[in-house]
Image (cartoon, helix red, strand yellow):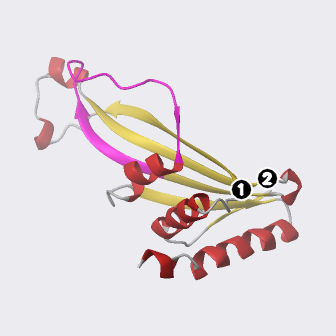
Amino acid sequence: MERFAIDLDPTQLVHWLLAEEEEGRLDHNIHAAHSYSWQPAPDTAEFRLGDEEQEDVDQVTLVGHLEIAPFAEGDGWTLRVRAEDSLGPRTPEDEPVPPEEEEIDLATFEEEFIRPKRAMIEIEGEARDENAKRRLQRLLQAIETDRHRKRRR
């Protein structure tokens, strides 16, 4: 399988998928999920705490995954979107966040990662061979052309 970066506006991608879904024309498998990752908070002036308090503070990031693949597994391609949104520092007293990945729908993915326009987003394609890559390129061209745009205005 060959992996390669995709240069596509994530807003356009998700809006196109939502429009296809709304029209009942979505003919791809869509899987969306989010999870949280924790890292020790950086030792910067912004977080000046004592040693004991510093140990209790974590930097929390909301991570989103969106995977688009054809219904026919033999088509041999997958389009993946990874989004990361830093939520900032958290202490043990803050509201707990789920420790495991949670499945979400496409509209929730848009709400959490696309609308706020603060997430770092990467889009990657994966293709089994050149024919699969061409099929994925046709999908990307349809998204860029976006026949739904006229109706949204």
Residue drawn at 52 percent across, 50 percent down: 106
Which region of the structure is painted magenta? 83-105
> Would you name the residue on which mark 2 appears?
71
Q: Nearer the viewer, residue 2 or 101?
A: 101
Q: CA distance from mark 1 to mark 2?
A: 5 Å
List the residue tagged with mark 1.
Answer: 28
Mark 2: give few (<14), some (14-19) or many (20+) Cα within 10 Å.
few
Amino acid type at circle 1 is His
Left-right relation of 5 to 126: left
Q: Is residue 94 magenta?
A: yes
Quick check: marks 1 and 2 in contact, CB under 8 Å?
A: yes
Q: Residues within 10 Å of mark 1 (few under 14, many from 20)?
A: some
Q: Residue 43: which quarter of the image?
A: top left
Numbered-mark total: 2
Foreground pick, 96 / 42: 96
Residue 73: x percent and y percent?
84, 51
**In this view, 135 is above or below 31:** below
* Of pointers 1 and 2, the one earlier in the residue sequence: 1
The disc labelled 2 sits on which kind of residue? Phe
State the residue in front, 23 or 58: 23
Residue 12 image point, x, y percent: 50, 70
